[in-house]
């Protein structure tokens, strides 16, 4: 299932040159009807931002929707993050700054892409630097990531 994730070359082209967490398929969701998932995390260590990409395999489209709907607890709906239309009616844009996300279903799959505007593991980074806003470029990257991720689920 890792082949369904955004590639390293795609991430580099969009400003995330470092793989912070390699794609793994042993990730478990904790929800029986969507028991397996894959995840990869990319980072731009200079700009202190990153991207998380996850895909969940579910037993049915209904199970995928139920599982993905649970993300609104982590990323409450944000009217400023209107999901791209090609993601379909299940798509939601949500945020919990410094995290900005789109999540949706595609058939029996659920997907989540997140931009982290404070992707630093350095404890010496000041609070001001950790609270970077979602820039226009990062918003474009988030949309592009969601559209590319959706195409990989077809």
Image (cartoon, rainbow, N blue to C red):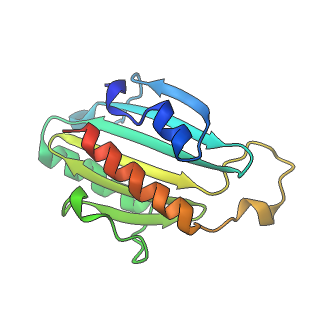
**Left or right, 44 with reference to 77:** right
Evaluate whether residue 111 shows in this view.
no
Q: Can you say which quadrant of the picture contains the C terminus? A: top left
Q: Which residue lies furthest to the right in this view?
A: 124
Q: Which of 12 and 23 is in front in this view?
A: 12
Q: What residue do we see at 57% from left, 30% from top?
A: 21
Q: What residue do we see at 36% from left, 36% from top?
A: 29
Q: What residue do we see at 31% from left, 25% from top?
A: 1
Q: Quadrant of the rendered structure where residue 19 is?
A: top right
Could you tell me how many numbered marks the image carries?
A: 0
Vertical comparison of 77 with 65: above or below: below
Vertical comparison of 129 with 42: above or below: below
Image x and y of residue 8, in percent: 50, 31
Q: What residue do we see at 35% from left, 35% from top?
A: 30
**Left or right, 69 with reference to 19:** left
Q: Quadrant of the rendered structure where residue 101 is?
A: bottom left
Image x and y of residue 61, in percent: 13, 45
Image x and y of residue 5, in percent: 38, 34
Vertical comparison of 142 with 4: above or below: below
Image x and y of residue 113, in percent: 42, 49
Evaluate whether residue 119 shows in this view.
yes
**Left or right, 36 with reference to 135:** left
Q: Which residue lies furthest to the bottom in this view?
A: 79
């Amino acid at each position: 299932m890792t082949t369904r994730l955004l590639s390293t070359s795609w991430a580099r082209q969009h400003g995330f040159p470092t793989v912070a967490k390699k794609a793994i398929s042993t990730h478990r969701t904790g929800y029986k009807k969507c028991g397996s998932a894959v995840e990869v995390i990319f980072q731009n260590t200079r700009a202190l931002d990153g991207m998380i990409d996850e895909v969940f395999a579910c037993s049915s489209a209904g199970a995928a929707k139920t599982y993905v709907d649970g993300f609104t607890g982590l990323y409450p709906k944000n009217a400023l993050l209107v999901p791209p239309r090609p993601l379909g009616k299940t798509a939601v844009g949500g945020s919990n700054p410094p995290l900005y996300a789109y999540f949706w279903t595609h058939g029996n799959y659920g997907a989540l892409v997140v931009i982290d505007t404070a992707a630093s593991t350095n404890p010496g980074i000041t609070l001001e630097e950790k609270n970077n806003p979602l820039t226009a470029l990062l918003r474009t990257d988030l949309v592009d990531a969601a559209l590319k991720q959706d195409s990989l689920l077809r």
